[in-house]
Image (cartoon, grey):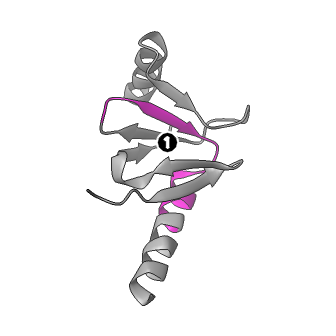
Amino acid sequence: MTNTELIHVGFENHLALNRVVAIATPASAPVKRMIQRGKEERHIIDLTSGRRTKAVVVLDNDWVALLAITPETFSGRVGAMRHVDASA
């Protein structure tokens, strides 16, 4: 059994890091289509708390998570979390 690492994505929301496949900005047409398809199929998780979507996370089970933090902030938190784990 693998350990699930949770990462804080804002507004007291957390995401299972081991389920993340990709993270992207919501600006491109393919990502916009992915968001629309996720909404249509009810496979979307809105973690923005009503804020503007700044990052789109693709999960390994075809679900899509919308975040109010930028992809750079997300990857920085992952890096910081990995650094803490490595030094422990």
Which quarter of the image is occupied by the C terminus? Answer: bottom left
The foreground one among 43 and 69 is 43
**Which residue in the rendered view is the most extreme toward the bottom?**
87
Among the 4 quarters of the image, the one containing residue 87: bottom left
**Residue 12: percent from the left, percent from the top?**
69, 50
- Indicate yes or no whether the magenta region holds residue 69: yes
Q: Residue at x 49, y 56 (%)?
A: 6
Residue corresponding to mark 1 = 25
Callout count: 1
Query: Which part of the image, by quadrant, shows the N terminus?
Result: bottom left
Residue 84 visible (yes or no)? yes
**Can residue 28 be seen from the camera position used here?**
no
Q: Left of 78 or right of it: where is 51?
A: right
Q: Position of residue 58 (x, y in %)?
A: 38, 38
**Residue 57, image x, y percentages:** 44, 41
> Under tag 1, what secondary structure?
loop
Q: Is residue 10 left or right of residue 44?
A: right
Residue drawn at x 59%, y 56% is: 8
Q: Which residues are magenta?
A: 61-76
Residue drawn at 35 percent across, 53 percent down: 18
> In the picture shown, does residue 11 fall above or below 8?
above
Confirm whether the magenta stretch covers residue 84: no
Q: Residues within 10 Å of mark 1 (few under 14, many from 20)?
A: some
User: Of the residues shown, which amino acid type is indicated by label 1?
Assistant: Thr
In the image, 67 versus 24, the foreground residue is: 67
